[in-house]
């Protein structure tokens, strides 16, 4: 079975893009999104994030941050992250604004707040197709090292889902096996398009 996947994180494009990059490389049909109001990247201090509109090309963000403080943004991993992101797609997209990209079979989120946002958004849509969508949360800390680990975990989970004939019938078993094997708790819910 060939499933369509969406990777969704909050607003900084690290965890979802790490997973998107890996799944795309492995030949999966995948997209990625953020749920925030803007793309927020670390700045010189916690009170000074770099804020961009969704749709701002990754290359433009990269050039902007390189101009502001190349050493800082190289050291904290933001420039390499933006360079990776620009090889995956042109610009970040907001989940709530891209309903036309669906329907997806599986939506994977990386923090519970985003999981709740996606479920709320799906519940507020008209369910015209009555096509099920599996929404799973794989909690991953938002740093470069954990995003890399999370990308491999997301790939493993998506690979298993993609190999099943009907995820609707085997999701409980898939989740239980994943949790046992990786010692990571998953939240999941089903909604409809």
Image: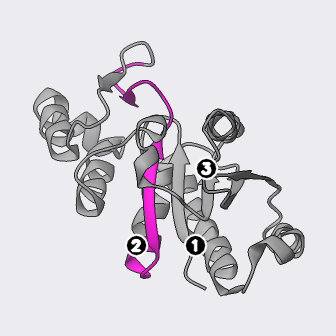
The answer to whether 174 appears left or right of 143 in the picture is: right
Q: Residue at x 53, y 65 (%)?
A: 5
Whole-number angstrom distance, CA of label 2 to CA of label 1: 10 Å
- The dot on residue 86 is none
Q: Quadrant of the N terminus?
A: bottom right
Q: Which residues are magenta?
A: 23-45
33 part of magenta stretch: yes
Q: Residue at x 43, y 37 (%)?
A: 12
142 part of magenta stretch: no
User: Is disc 3 placed on a helix, strand or loop?
Assistant: loop
**Residue 153 at x, y = what percent?**
64, 68
**Residue 23 at x, y = what percent?**
47, 72
The image quadrant that residue 113 belongs to is: top right
Q: Residue at x 32, y 33 (%)?
A: 54
| First reached walking from the N terminus: tag 2 or tag 1 | 2
The answer to whether 66 appears left or right of 103 in the picture is: left
User: Is disc 1 placed on a helix, strand or loop?
Assistant: helix
| First reached walking from the N terminus: tag 3 or tag 2 | 2
Within 10 Å of disc 3 (Cα), the crowding (few <14, some 14-19, many 20+) is few
Way the structure is coloured: one colour
Q: Is residue 174 visible?
A: no
Task: Name the residue nearer the viewer: 123 or 61.
Answer: 123
Looking at the image, is mark 3 or mark 2 nearer the viewer? 3
Whole-number angstrom distance, CA of label 3 to CA of label 1: 30 Å
Q: Residue at x 48, y 29 (%)?
A: 36
- Per the image, the residue denoted by label 1 is 155
- Per the image, the residue denoted by label 3 is 128
- Per the image, the residue denoted by label 2 is 24
Tag 2 near tag 1, CB within 8 Å: no
Task: Name the residue nearer the viewer: 120 or 14.
Answer: 120
The answer to whether 150 appears left or right of 185 in the picture is: left
From this viewpoint, which residue is outermost toward the top?
Answer: 47
């Amino acid at each position: 079975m060939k499933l369509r996947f969406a990777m969704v994180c909050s607003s900084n494009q690290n965890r979802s893009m790490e997973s998107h990059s890996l799944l795309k490389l492995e030949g999966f049909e995948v997209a990625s999104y953020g749920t925030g109001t803007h793309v927020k990247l670390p700045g010189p201090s916690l009170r000074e994030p770099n804020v961009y509109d969704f749709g701002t090309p990754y290359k433009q963000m990269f050039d902007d941050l390189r101009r502001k403080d190349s050493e800082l943004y190289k050291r904290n991993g933001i420039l390499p992250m933006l360079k990776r992101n620009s090889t995956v797609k042109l610009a970040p997209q907001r989940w709530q604004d891209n309903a036309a990209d669906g329907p997806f079979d599986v939506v994977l989120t990386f923090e519970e707040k985003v999981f709740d946002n996606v479920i709320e958004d799906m519940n507020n849509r008209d369910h015209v197709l009555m096509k099920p969508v599996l929404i799973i949360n794989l909690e991953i800390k938002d740093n470069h090292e954990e995003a890399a680990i999370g990308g491999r975990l997301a790939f493993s989970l998506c690979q298993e889902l993609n190999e099943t004939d009907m995820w609707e019938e085997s999701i409980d078993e898939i989740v239980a096996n994943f949790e046992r094997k990786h010692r990571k708790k998953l939240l999941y819910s089903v909604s409809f398009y």
